[in-house]
């Protein structure tokens, strides 16, 4: 009985908040961003050693304490089981396979399925995009050999999903968001995971998904975005064993709440060679202190399981946040990072997303090379690339489009193909 009440209240809250949200730049409150390059003890960070050994660990700790929670130190075993393999999938364009990653200890077992597409004709290990999907691996492409997900999904009238389950009719339902054939054509692989395999996306008191493997107190302090980020790193653990994939050239990608996840995963795990955030908004790339579109209070009320309890203390209190999201973007340095927005997705605060990557520039500058030097938004559909930083705002709304993928691959061509 709990689930419908939660999601009905979220829908009601969203309708109310969309009506009351601030979309006027003139009404953005005066705010001061925490200094990126001053340590908690007041030391000016002016070189790579100080960034890596002092400021970066401080920022990770601050985000763990105030936003994302800390991944618990728990004992578990992990097994990889390769399932279906099709060497001539998608009319001979792809080498396709499923891999089930099992996590288990004395408490329980949790399975996460990775669906992998690789260019069929490649004779060497390929770079790869890794990301979560919302409705099961079968939703990204009509390819009939993808196993239908049995994990929880959010109901969607628009997509015809009821009862929090998908069936055969869901095959390819979100293919517009995953440019599978084009990714393969450009020499990249793609690996996708249904995010609910790791943790179902509802406020269940942290009793399901990977939380089943930890004690109750640890579970409560390990919110969903952090759990999903952990799962991406475990997928990378598998990728490191796969000779067909170059584990040094992995781009982690996410859209919306999963863009928040890809950023946190990239911050925590420096094995990810490139990090992509697509329309991630509040708690992702957008500056919280701007209070534009979705706010800290709105997101914490609608989705109380995404962030830790400390973050809720900043509901309507963003001014007192000791960190902001430009610091999260800075944690990717010196690895390349791409932040993308959409003109009609004002809820995600496109300007706040751009300002985050702009204000992160000081960290990237430590490593030399070009960085963003202007806080003026670029023209629509005209990406700006400055060294390891990239941003675009495209025509359209809250979605992932072929335009997005082409620009991400252009950026990956610069930074991954030369590794």
Image (spheres, helix red, strand yellow):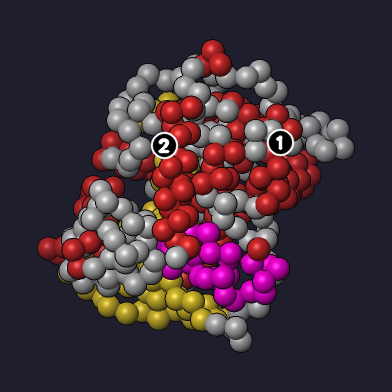
Work out whether residue 4 or residue 336 is closer to the camera in this orientation and state it: 4
Label drawn at residue 412: none
Q: Is residue 286 visible?
A: yes
Is 148 left, or right, of 266 in this rendering? left
Residue 12, percent from left and from top: 43, 42
What residue is shown at x 45% (from left), y 56% (from top)? 5
Cα–Cα gap, marks 2 and 1: 26 Å
Earlier-in-chain disc, 2 versus 1: 2
What residue is shown at x 68% (from left), y 38% (from top)? 314
Q: What residue is pinned by disc 1?
A: 321
Residue 399, percent from left and from top: 33, 40
Q: Badge 1: how crowded within 10 Å, few (<14), some, or many (20+)?
A: some
Q: Badge 2: how crowded within 10 Å, few (<14), some, or many (20+)?
A: few
Q: Is residue 211 magenta?
A: yes
Residue 3, percent from left and from top: 44, 61
In this view, the residue farthest toward the bottom is 106
Please, what secondary structure does the residue beneath circle 2 have? helix
Q: What residue is pinned by disc 2?
A: 15
What residue is shown at x 59% (from left), y 76% (from top)? 213
Q: Is residue 276 visible?
A: no
Nearest to viewer (mark 2 / mark 1): 2
In this view, the residue farthest toward the left is 91
Q: Which residues are magenta?
A: 194-219
């Amino acid at each position: 009985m709990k689930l419908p009440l939660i999601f009905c209240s979220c829908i009601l809250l969203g309708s109310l908040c969309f009506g009351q949200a601030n979309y006027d730049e003139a009404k953005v409150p005066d705010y001061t961003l925490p200094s990126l390059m001053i340590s908690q003890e007041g030391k000016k960070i002016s070189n790579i050693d100080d960034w890596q050994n002092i400021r970066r660990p401080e920022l990770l700790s601050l985000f763990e304490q105030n936003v994302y929670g800390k991944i618990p130190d728990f004992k578990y075993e992990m097994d990889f089981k390769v399932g279906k393999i099709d060497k001539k999938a998608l009319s001979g364009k792809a080498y396709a396979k499923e891999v089930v990653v099992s996590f288990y200890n004395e408490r329980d077992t949790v399975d996460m399925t990775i669906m992998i597409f690789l260019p069929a004709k490649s004779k060497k290990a390929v770079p790869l995009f890794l990301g979560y999907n919302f409705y099961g691996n079968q939703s990204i492409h009509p390819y009939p050999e993808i196993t239908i997900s049995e994990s929880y999904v959010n109901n969607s009238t628009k997509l015809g999903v009821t009862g929090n389950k998908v069936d055969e009719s869901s095959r390819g339902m979100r293919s517009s968001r995953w440019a599978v054939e084009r990714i393969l054509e450009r020499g990249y692989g793609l690996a996708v995971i249904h995010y609910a395999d790791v943790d179902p996306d509802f406020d269940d008191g942290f009793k399901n998904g990977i939380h089943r493997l930890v004690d109750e107190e640890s579970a409560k302090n390990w919110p969903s975005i952090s759990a999903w980020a952990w799962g991406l790193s475990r997928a990378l653990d598998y990728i490191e064993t796969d000779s067909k994939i170059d584990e040094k050239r992995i781009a982690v990608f996410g859209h919306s709440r999963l863009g928040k996840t890809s950023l946190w995963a990239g911050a925590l795990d420096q094995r990810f060679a490139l990090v992509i955030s697509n329309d991630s908004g509040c708690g992702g790339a957008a500056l919280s202190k701007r209070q534009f579109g979705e706010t800290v209070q709105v997101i914490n009320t609608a989705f109380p399981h995404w962030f830790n309890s400390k973050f809720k203390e900043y509901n309507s209190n963003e001014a007192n946040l000791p960190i902001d999201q430009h610091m999260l973007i800075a944690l990717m340095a010196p690895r390349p990072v791409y932040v993308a927005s959409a003109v009609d997705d004002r809820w995600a605060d496109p300007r706040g997303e751009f300002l985050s990557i702009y204000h992160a520039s000081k960290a990237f500058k430590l490593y030399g090379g070009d960085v963003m030097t202007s806080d003026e938004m670029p023209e629509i559909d005209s990406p700006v690339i400055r060294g390891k930083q990239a941003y675009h705002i495209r025509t359209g709304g809250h979605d992932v489009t072929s335009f997005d993928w082409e620009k991400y691959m252009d950026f990956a061509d610069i930074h991954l193909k030369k590794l």
